[in-house]
Image (cartoon, helix red, strand yellow):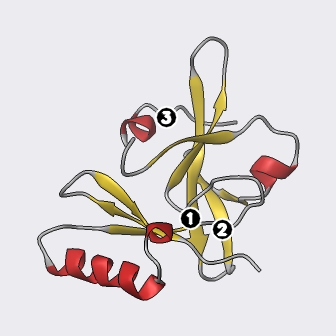
Amino acid sequence: MRGVKFRIWDSFNGVMIYSENYNSLWKFFKVYEDLVRGENAPKLMQFTGLKDRNVWAGDIIGEPRVGDKLEVIGIVKYDEDLAAFITEKVNGGWEYLHKHFDENKNHKVIGNICENPELLEKAENVK
């Protein structure tokens, strides 16, 4: 059974804080609670659990193009109604997250919404 992992974006200090750096989730969430109480606007993100992938909620999925260009596909989110991680596409709609990695696609994590918001600003629509 895999452990549940989380990360927090600390916008005040500009750092990502990972739950695996703490010996208990209680201590990790105490840090989160302290950040919420301050003037910080922390963003809590959960690990998706995809085998052999390091994909988290809040990650931006893209596909390499010719040269050094990347096409932004969408953002990884957890959908409570579906009880599943999905990719919310930049051109509208969504797909189950695993489809981006299970179907021989060349998709990969190219950043996240906290550290790389400019990727979404430059996003082109996806077919």
Residue found at x 29% / y 68% = 42
With respect to residue 29, does 113 lie above or below? above
Query: Which residue occupies the foreground of this view, 101 or 19?
Result: 19
Farthest-out residue, bottom:
26
Q: Position of residue 1 (x, y in %)?
A: 77, 80
Which mark is nearer the camera, 2 or 3? 2
Residue found at x 37% / y 83% = 27
Q: Position of residue 55 (x, y in %)?
A: 62, 55
Left or right, 32 with respect to 19, comes to left
Q: How far apart are marks 2 and 1 (CA)?
A: 6 Å
Q: How far apart are marks 2 and 3 (CA)?
A: 21 Å
Q: Do the residues labelled 2 and 1 touch (CB within 8 Å)?
A: yes
Q: Earlier in the sequence, mark 3 or mark 1?
A: 1
Which label sits on residue 123?
3
Q: Mark 2 points at which residue?
A: 85
Q: Name the residue under label 1.
A: 77
Q: Which of marks 2 and 1 is nearer the N terminus?
A: 1
Q: Is mark 2 on a helix, strand or loop?
A: strand
Q: How crowded is mark 3: few (under 14 residues within 10 Å), some or many (20 or more)?
A: some
Q: How far apart are marks 3 and 1 (CA)?
A: 17 Å
Q: Position of residue 52 (x, y in %)?
A: 76, 53
Q: How crowded is mark 1: few (under 14 residues within 10 Å), some or many (20 or more)?
A: many
